[in-house]
Amino acid sequence: MHDAWIVKHRPRSAKEVVGNRRAIEIFERWLRSWEHAIPTQRAAFLHGPPGIGKTVIVEALAQDLGAELIERNASDYRTEEKIRQVAGFASQYMGFFGKNRIILLDEMDGVYGTVDRGAIPAITEIIKNTRYPIVLIANDFWNKKFVSFRDKKKFLIIEFKKPSVNDIFKHLKKICVKESLPADDDALRFLAQRSQGDVRSGVNDLQALGQGKKRLLFSDVSWLAYRDRKDVIFSVLRQVLYSKSCKAAKQMVDLADVDIDMLFEWIYENLPYHFNIPSELAAAMEALATADLYRGRIRQTQNWKLMRYVIDFMTAGVAMARRKSKPSGWVPFRFPQRIRTLSTSRAERKKKSEIGKKIKQRMHVSVGVANKDVLPFLKIIFESDPSMAAGLAGWFNFNEEEIIYVAGGKRQANAILSSVAN
Amino acid sequence: MSSEMWAEKYRPKFLKQMVDQKEIVERLESFVKSHNVPHCIFAGPPGTGKTTAALCLAHDLYGETYRENLMELNASDERGINVVRQTVKTFARVRTLGEIPFKILILDEADNMTGDAQQALRRTMERYTETCRFILIANYSGKILEPIQSRCAPFRFTYLPREEQDEYLKRIVKNENIVLQQDGLDAIYEVCGGDLRKAINSLQAAASLGKPIGSETVYSVVGRANPADVHAMIKIAMDGNFLEARKRLREMIVKYGVAGSDIIKQIHIELFRLEIPENLKVKLAGIVGEVDFRLVEGASEEVQLSALLARLVEAGYEFKGG
Amino acid sequence: MSSEMWAEKYRPKFLKQMVDQKEIVERLESFVKSHNVPHCIFAGPPGTGKTTAALCLAHDLYGETYRENLMELNASDERGINVVRQTVKTFARVRTLGEIPFKILILDEADNMTGDAQQALRRTMERYTETCRFILIANYSGKILEPIQSRCAPFRFTYLPREEQDEYLKRIVKNENIVLQQDGLDAIYEVCGGDLRKAINSLQAAASLGKPIGSETVYSVVGRANPADVHAMIKIAMDGNFLEARKRLREMIVKYGVAGSDIIKQIHIELFRLEIPENLKVKLAGIVGEVDFRLVEGASEEVQLSALLARLVEAGYEFKGG
Amino acid sequence: MSSEMWAEKYRPKFLKQMVDQKEIVERLESFVKSHNVPHCIFAGPPGTGKTTAALCLAHDLYGETYRENLMELNASDERGINVVRQTVKTFARVRTLGEIPFKILILDEADNMTGDAQQALRRTMERYTETCRFILIANYSGKILEPIQSRCAPFRFTYLPREEQDEYLKRIVKNENIVLQQDGLDAIYEVCGGDLRKAINSLQAAASLGKPIGSETVYSVVGRANPADVHAMIKIAMDGNFLEARKRLREMIVKYGVAGSDIIKQIHIELFRLEIPENLKVKLAGIVGEVDFRLVEGASEEVQLSALLARLVEAGYEFKGG
Amino acid sequence: MSSEMWAEKYRPKFLKQMVDQKEIVERLESFVKSHNVPHCIFAGPPGTGKTTAALCLAHDLYGETYRENLMELNASDERGINVVRQTVKTFARVRTLGEIPFKILILDEADNMTGDAQQALRRTMERYTETCRFILIANYSGKILEPIQSRCAPFRFTYLPREEQDEYLKRIVKNENIVLQQDGLDAIYEVCGGDLRKAINSLQAAASLGKPIGSETVYSVVGRANPADVHAMIKIAMDGNFLEARKRLREMIVKYGVAGSDIIKQIHIELFRLEIPENLKVKLAGIVGEVDFRLVEGASEEVQLSALLARLVEAGYEFKGG
């Protein structure tokens, strides 16, 4: 009775897992295929947001299939040496009872990206030779440290999605029955919605609010604080963009408990859609630029008290720019594109600087000059003349990835690569 | 002058002594009743009773031996991954002897933990969930990783309403046999907002002067200028009386022992309470911000404060002119 | 030239020798009488006798052995948490032998301590409160954490009135057998305000030239321009004679060895003594603020000071024109 | 097809191969003859042969083993004081074996070094002057500290005259067996000024298209090599499409890594080519100057430049409206 | 090119060789006679012989072994508290062997020390006053703490008059067997004012080109534009020809390798030589100040200088119009 409900009501078999039927099916089929022979995909990579049962499904299927589950977590494999110790052996030798075995490397997000001292290469190495299925789990599959797992030939990649509100609602209802806690459907539906697909947090909320109650009413749940998720941002945005007073615009930031830098990005992304008169758009952008100026000053001086002016200008400043501007019709709020672009282009920028260093060695210029005055011309050559490009690639000592980058894509690079091979 | 801190002396010991955060207290009491506590996040501004609530919960749960079943850690003190890895594990590993099969670990300022430390914490929470429940205390829950948030029941603490804070202070006043005037009470609220701990500390400092406590005492003790004075000074400046405004400013600096940079902060607050058009407020914020930044860069305080007042006077001209 | 510092030589040794800060001295004497001293905060601007008062208190309390029962620490010297944690603890741990069961620790520039260090200090004060009393010396009490403030009796020191400072200096002049002219005395007050320590130091530096001390000597010794010169330069600029004003400015810089940023401060002061309409002062104050900031940022002194003069000339036109 | 960048392939190896900068070459040759080289500063715009001259000098001096006696360092890649202190010292410390008792260190982009780094450099130059001679390469010698300048023989490189650049290119054209039309040659000069490196790179890129090279080809190559199509972006903004303009801007910054300062320079130049009334140009130039200034202090280049785009949208609207 | 620095080679060795600063030299000679030196502050602009005077004093005092009794430290090099605490102490602790019972420590750029370091210095000066005398060298004595000032005899150095500087340079010219034309001499004074060290360094750099030294050589060697060129450019701009003025500006930057911030300073100087009404000069001085500041903050030179030219064009219109 002392167990937290998320433990107590953890699914014991695959059937009990909420949502993601198709993903579970694919995963189960893959696990079962090991009974016949070792498949070409020796590892599965399950990814998706927290709290939707990724770990749970592995445990449940191990149970269902009667397999021994060897479970390891990030803290166990930060280094190459450790990973070999914990997973290398298990992947090769049989246990005592000749049982089947599943090796689970959970919470891969916790593996250090840059300082992992070879943990990820070691994992890939173990996967290459494993005799038992290996399952990797992470929230953010697109993190660049997982780049080596993106090869679909070698890895079964399964995305887990958020279960529907209805699925979670049903799950919560089941728990209420087991706990003998009568509950209003409204209350449960509210909790289901609020969880935003995070089943675990839904169960947690249910315990926090319901435990010890005779009956769970809508009024018991509605007061509960929101976790910081999009709808909070949306209401702040609306207030910031349409407030009539400085106080109202500023207040939301204090009340809503959101990350200021993130909010700034949201405002920057969405502001232009909500001002249709050029002079007012200019004034609003000006206010934002002023806020940004103070962000820069904070960075430079490390004096955080200046944050108050960032907030003034990004909220009150933006709001006060409005005289008559209205959006043309209903405009949905958009996720900040800049964040997305920046994160997708990070790897590219790193590649560029590597290339710059190679140019520098050959041409007696700085990396900066190389990227500004040499690389653009090199790109044209690589796009237009494969044989000259092949020669230059050799001269600069570019590797395959770098050739593809300079050529502007795999397709364009093919001619160069084959010419290099000859 | 007693050396005991009133903030400690008057801290509630049991949940039922907590006068504020009713809904949260009620939920916590139900945890006690059912002998089951999930991992929790207590989020909210300083002085809203987060730590107090956690301690009361433990007290109610374990009774007088609660100290043995409870551990407080400050994440920002010994920040980083090692706290989590080692101290926490050691504590969580040892089983409790009493009726309740788990211990409680309070992790203060959890939002100051690095991302790595939080990742490690996430794992520890999971592994020791049977023997240890975590209460993470944070100002902003947004700074806590989602996978951890999703493992915790969230509670948001809010500032005490004015009346409740007043009641609290009045109780202390009565007990300590001091005199607190109404304007002193107002000043404390003005300075401390709903931060109860800060309010009690200020009260104690003011009391140490041994005189009836009025607003002037409070402001002088906390080294803040009286908002009414700041307000008046801004108005005088915006009415065009530059020299008088400057005189007032200097008086405030001497009278309250305030640093120029602190005066700027107060001007910033007061400015949004002025009865002037809203867009003018943004403009004034720009002026204040500029001067504030100059001071940060090391410009002369005296010169810059004059410049600030001058800009306010000019803004006043414009306002009336346009 | 004697190597003894007059500021030390003429520092009062006992509370009853202190001529200023009457009210404070009285309260301190009552501590001595009762053989009990609470933790204290001495707040106020530099040179108002804070450290002197603390030393006198100790002297009166312990008599001639006071050095053994007293420790002075400068928080900004070895700033940070370690001072507090270690030095303070070591000192506070050892019990005193005399009649008074506690020692006194003077912590100078306590408002320069980081927040963390202050937190640590708070804990140390709490733990060793029986064996050690703290006197925190600060310019701004507002920069000290409230939990510390609420443990301390607050004292606010203010600038010496002109007459008391003059009297003080005249005593030294007589004793040291030097000649101080009235305009020299005026210049010292002009430069040092009520900061007594600064005044005595300036007097001693001026005396080292071995000549009767007039205003020129004082200004040249402290590296400040003569206000009359600054005043004249501003007037010339505002009369429209830009080139002449610029020439004067350069002369002052060479003659007094003044840095441009210091000239700015003086122009700022003189501004308010000019007989010009207030709206013009407003304008000029804004300009001076701008240029002050630019110099702080490292802009060219010559270019910026010219720019400032140019703005003064413009202002002069407007004044006459409008 | 050749497997080198032509700019390297046709880079002179010996001083006597250098066709340009005659006077400089002569002085350098006299150094070689006397087996003695003072510290030097090579100053001048990009692509005028500064690095080439330094390399040739070393080659002539040491013969084929010149690589061992020469070190190239780029100050903008490894800025800061430590390069100078450590790398330089290590290299300078080891004595050479050959006939010449010193090594040569080429410090490229020396005008990008901080003041502190230059101070350290100065001391290092002094200390190791017997075993190591420095050739500082810079765009502006004025940004190099005077004490360093006065220790160095100054050389000033200037842009190649049109005929010399043409001759150079024609030699390459002949050797590489490509066809360069007269209008192509004109276009290269038009676009590259006297920057030889840029000219050769443009030629090679144009040649890679495999067609006779006319002006069209040159312009298109240079245009493609410049990912910042600022002109188009300005037009889009002035046509009122802020979102599209912002998208373009983001691509330039994020995708192509163009520095904000380069974009704004480009905007400034394009501004004067716009077909809008002069007074609007002046107005916009003022705004560009303002944003340029903020670009340095702000946190995000994109946000600052977006604000400029919004102003352009506004200006476009007004222009059409009025 | 000899590697010896002329500024060293021609530096006076004894007080009696010093041609300038008569009054100061006299006072110093009296110290030598009395075998006693107080702590001193030598204040004044760069290149006025402060260090030279200190070295001569030591030479005269100790004779040929003066190097052992003298230590030179640069406060801004290894700024901060530790220099003072350690190096100084070590040096001051060891007693001298000769007739004079104290050593001399020259602390250059003492006004660049932090307040903390100066505090520590003050204590060190006090403690070792018998065995060590300090000569603090500073540009502005006002930046040295008064408690230090009051311990030191003040000396104020001023710029050399034009004739003395010319004489000095001519002596070198004769000795080194070089040709310096009158316009070269003028240019050196134009660029260096009375800063003798800078003048000698510039002369040596110009001489290294091996040609008779005229004004062009001087300007090009020091990376300053020829004032005549700057003058012409301003005129062109004020005549309304923006594009031509911008071309000239770029040419100057290339030709003389001038940094933007230096061009600004020169524009500022030329401004006052223009034959335009004074009120226009006033206006332009304001504008130059603004742009100077932006450049310091790191704004783009090209954009900001263009903007400045645009403002000059505007001013020209107004001038002719009004």
Image (cartoon, coloured by chain):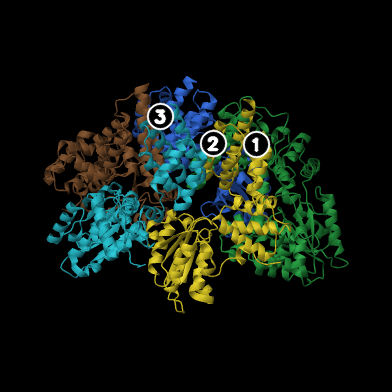
Chain colours: A green, B blue, C brown, D yellow, E cyan
According to the image, label 1 marks what residue? D237
C-alpha separation, residue under disc 1 versus residue under disc 2: 15 Å
Question: Is label 1 in a helix, a strand or a loop?
Answer: helix
Say whether residue B204 is left or right of residue C185.
right
Tell me the chain of label 2.
D
Give the amino acid at mark 3: Ala
Image position of E204 with respect to B322: above or below: below
| Quadrant of the rendered image containing residue A397 | bottom right
A85 or D98: nearer the eye?
D98
A373 or A43: nearer the eye?
A373
Q: Residues within 10 Å of mark 1 (few under 14, many from 20)?
A: many
C-alpha separation, residue under disc 1 versus residue under disc 3: 38 Å
Q: Residues within 10 Å of mark 3 (few under 14, many from 20)?
A: many
Q: Position of residue C308 (x, y in %)?
A: 37, 36
Is any part of residue B262 visible from this angle?
Answer: yes
Q: Earlier in the sequence, mark 1 or mark 2?
A: 1
Q: Position of residue D41 (x, y in %)?
A: 44, 61
Say whether residue C180 is left or right of residue D156.
left
Tell me the chain of label 3.
B
According to the image, label 2 marks what residue? D287
Q: Position of residue E270 (x, y in %)?
A: 38, 42
| Quadrant of the rendered image containing residue D126 | bottom left
